[in-house]
Image (tube, rainbow, N blue to C red):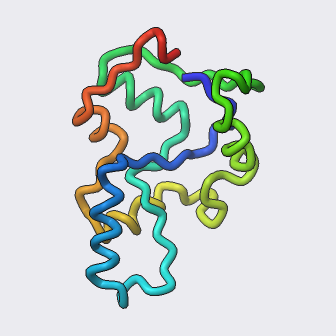
Amino acid sequence: IATPLTPRAVPLVDPADLGPVVRAILDNPEGWADAEVAVVGDVLTIPQVAHVYSEVTGKPARAVFVDHIPQEDIPQWVARHSAYRDTGYFPKYVGRESEIPTLARKLVPEMKSFADWLKESGFVASAEDA
């Protein structure tokens, strides 16, 4: 898994989990007024993503940190995520990234972890994905 990100934790979510979280908030808006809810199923570093991927799929994976990925390969991604190289995705939780999924799981306890998503989706990277 090649990435321009540092070894900071990145938020992961199955898009199918978004709707149930929004519904839970709308069903009980008073309980969530002024709350900041990071809708995240898992928060892993890229080496952890590679490790979980290897465990679930049985395919070897490793993290490779690169200084540059050509813009023509992923036009908006690098620009969109470059700010997170230094601050992380959730600066309030630096050093406590594992707490982030807890809030969303209060709303939807069955939110998927990255491992759950891999198992359910059956995703296996191909050589073309590298």
At 62% across and 44% down in the image, what residue appears?
Answer: 8
Q: Quadrant of residue 29?
A: bottom left
Task: Indicate the quadrant where residue 45 lies.
Answer: top right
| Residue drawn where x is 67% and y is 37% of the image | 76
Residue 40 image position (x, y, % from top left):
43, 56
In the image, 37: left or right of 25? right
Asked whether the viewer can see residue 69, the reply is no
From the viewer's side, name the closer residue of 75 and 54.
75
Rendered location of residue 44, percent (x, y): 49, 43
Left or right of 88 in this view: 109: left
User: Front-most of 121 and 105?
Assistant: 121
Q: How many marks?
A: 0
On screen, residue 7 above or below 22:
above
Residue 1 figure quarter: top right
Left or right: 48 in relation to 73: left
Asked whether residue 53 appears in the rendered view, the answer is yes
- Of residues 75 and 98, the one nearer the viewer is 75
x, y percent for residue 67: 77, 26
Residue found at the very far bottom of the displayed protein: 30
Can you give x and y, in whole percent of width and height, for residue 116 in the image?
Answer: 27, 41
In the displayed structure, 79 sits above or below 43; it is: above
Q: Residue at x 48, y 11 (%)?
A: 128
Vertical side of 52 occupied by 38: above or below: below
Q: Residue furthest top?
A: 127
Give me the residue at 53% from left, 31% from top: 47
